[in-house]
Amino acid sequence: MLKTDILADYNISREEIEKEITELISSNVPENIDEIYTNSLKNYEVGSILKGRILNITDNGVIIDGGYKSEGIVHLNEFENRDEIVIGDEIEVLLEAIEDDTGIIRLSKRKADRIKGWQNIITQYKEGDVVTGKVIRKIKGGLIVDLGVPIFLPASQIDVKPPGEIAEYIGTEVTCKILKIDHERQNIVVSRRKLIEEERFEKREKILAEIASGEVRTGVVKNIADFGVFVDLGGLDGLLHITDMSWGRVSHPSEMLALGDEIEVKIMEVDKEQGRISLGLKQKTENPWLSVEDKYPVGSTVKGEVVNIMNYGAFVKLETGIEGLIHISEMSWTRRINHPSEVVAIGDIVEVVVLKVDKESTEISLSMKQTEVNPWAVIEEKYPKDSIITGRVRNLTNYGAFIEIEEGVDGLLHISDMSWSKKVNHPSEIVKRGEKIETVVLSVDKEKKRVALGLKQLTDDPWEKEIPEKYKLDDIIKGKVTKLTNFGAFIDLGDGLEGLLHISELSQGKRISNPSEVVSIGDEIETKIIRIEPESRKIGLGLKGLKFKITEAPAVTEEAPSANDAAAEDDSPEEQAAPEVENSGESEEQAVSAEAGDSNED
C-alpha cells in the first residue's frame, strides 16, 4: 500500500501512478492472451500424456521439465534400467497431479508406458491370436508376461500337466494364445496350454493316420503308473503295460524305466476311434518260453536266483523271463516249514530239480528237497527196531516228548513209555527240553513218517519180577503222600513206585468227603499192602489193623487237584490204578502222525 506522505513529497498524485501502470501492462499483452491461457490449461490436464525432458537425477527420483511453470518428478523404481536414464533425453509421462503439497508436479512413466502399450496391443491383436512374451514375475495364481503391457498367464494354463514350481519360468520367453481381452479393466489373459493342446491334436491326428501295428517307434517316457508306462510318440501317448515290459518279473515299471527315458517300442494295437495305442517292449525279443522244454527238461538239476517269496513258496529265476516255483512242500524232506523265508531269502542262489514244465501256462515246478536223499527212505535201515539211539529233547507236549534223532527227523517218546512204575503227569517230570537222552526204537513207519521211542524199555519191567518179590501182602510200609484226589491219596513207596490209599481206608469209621480232611501232601504215613496186581500195575494200601499215625509235613502251598484229574484216575469205585495222561483235546493219533517239529512249541 502506497504511503501518501511519500507521494506528497514528490508532488505525485495516486491517480497518475495507477494510470501509468495500466498503460504499461496493456502495451505488452498479446491480443490472443485468452486463447494462449486456454491452450495452456488443455495441455496440463490430469491424466494426459506429456513429453518432458530429463533435467536431473536425485535419490528420490528423476526431475522432468514438462513445460509447466514447475518441474515434475518420476520415481526411480518406474525405470527398469537406471543406467539408461540420461539427462537431456525426452520421455513420455502421465500427469498424475498438478502441484501437490510439495509444490511439485507428480508424473508417472510406468502408467504412460502402459497406456501406450495397451493402445498398441488392442490395435495389433485380438482374442485367439498367438503372442510371445517374456515372463517377468510370479504372482498369486500364475505368471505375469511382458508383451509391452503386463498380461496374465494362469498357472492352470502353463502346461498340459501340472508344472510344479512355476517360478522356474521367470526370465524365459513363452508363446501363448490370447484367451480374453478385457477392454474395461485393460487386462489380457493368455494360455500356453491351449496352444500346446492344439499342436498336439494336429500331431495326434497325423500319427493316427500313419501308424500301424507291428511298427517299431521311438518315444519318451511321459508318465509312470503302477500298471505301466505312458510313452509320448510325438504328439500321441501310447500305453506300455507292465506285463509287456519284460518276459521276466517286473514288480513296478520304475524298476526298468524312468521319466524322460527315450525308448524303442513295438506298436501292438491301434484303436483309431478311441485314439489309443498299445505298446510292447518285450515283444522286440523272442519269447524264451518257446524253447523252455528243451532248455529245462523234467528231472534236470539247475541253479537259479530267488527273486520273490510268498506264503506258499519261492520263485526262482532261471534266466531272464523264465521263473519257476518251489512250493513250500518241496523245500525239505523233514523240516516242518511255516514260511519259505525260514529256508531261503531273496537273492539266494539255489540248486533245484525241475519237476514239471507247462509251456502254455508259462509255469515251471521246482524242488529243493529232490536234490537230496529222502532220509525217510532209509530210516528203517538207519534206526531198526530195538536199537538204542541218543537224541536231544526238542519239544515237550502234554502227551510226550519229541526227540531229535538227526536234523529234521524226530521221534515221539510217549508219556506212557517214560517209566514202568511212576505215575507221570507231564513229560517235564522225567526229561528236560534241550537235554540229551538215550531211548529205544519201538517202531518205525516210513510211510507215515513216524518213529516211536521208549525210555522205560532201557530197563527190565520191574512188575514182572522185582516188585512182586519185594512187596508182599500185609507188608507194613511207610511213605509220603504225593497226591490227593477225591477218591484217595497216592503214597510214594520208593523207586518211583506209588500205591493208592483209598478214601474208605482213611475214614476210620467216620464219613469224610475228601482225603484232605485227614492227610496233606508231604505227610508221612504207615500203611499196609492189601493188594498187588502186576497185570494192571497197581498196589492197593490200607490202614486196617494199624495204629493210624501221621507225621505232618511242613506247611506248603499246594494247588488242589482238578476234578478232571480225579475223574481220569477214578478207574473203579473202590480200587484205582495210576490214571492215563490227558491229551488236552489232541488225540494220540494226531500227535504220533506229526513229523519232527509238528508241535509249535520249541
Image: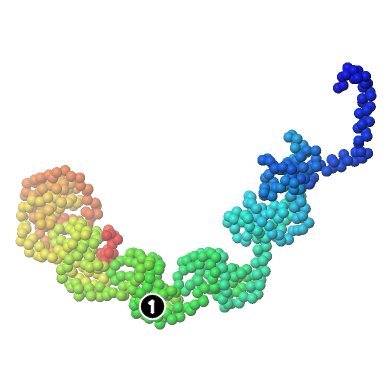
Task: Give the percent coordinates (x, y) of residue 381.
Answer: 20, 75
Q: Is residue 544 above or below residue 336?
A: above
Q: Residue at x 79, y 46 (%)?
A: 50
Q: Residue at x 20, y 58 (%)?
A: 432
Residue type (three-letter) at the residue carrying disc 1: Lys
The residue that mark 1 highlights is: 356
Q: Is residue 156 above or below residue 347?
A: above
Can residue 139 be seen at all in this image of the molecule? yes
Tell me the quarter of the picture where residue 179 sits: bottom right
Can residue 504 be seen at all in this image of the molecule? no
| Pick the front one: 216 or 602 | 216
Tell me the quarter of the picture where residue 352 sits: bottom left
Task: Give the percent coordinates (x, y) of residue 318.
Answer: 39, 74
Q: How is the image coloured?
A: rainbow
Task: Give the percent coordinates (x, y) of residue 223.
Answer: 55, 64
Q: Quadrant of the C terminus?
A: bottom left
| Pick the front one: 113 or 127 | 113
Q: Residue at x 14, y 66 (%)?
A: 457
Specify the farthest residue to the front.
Answer: 10
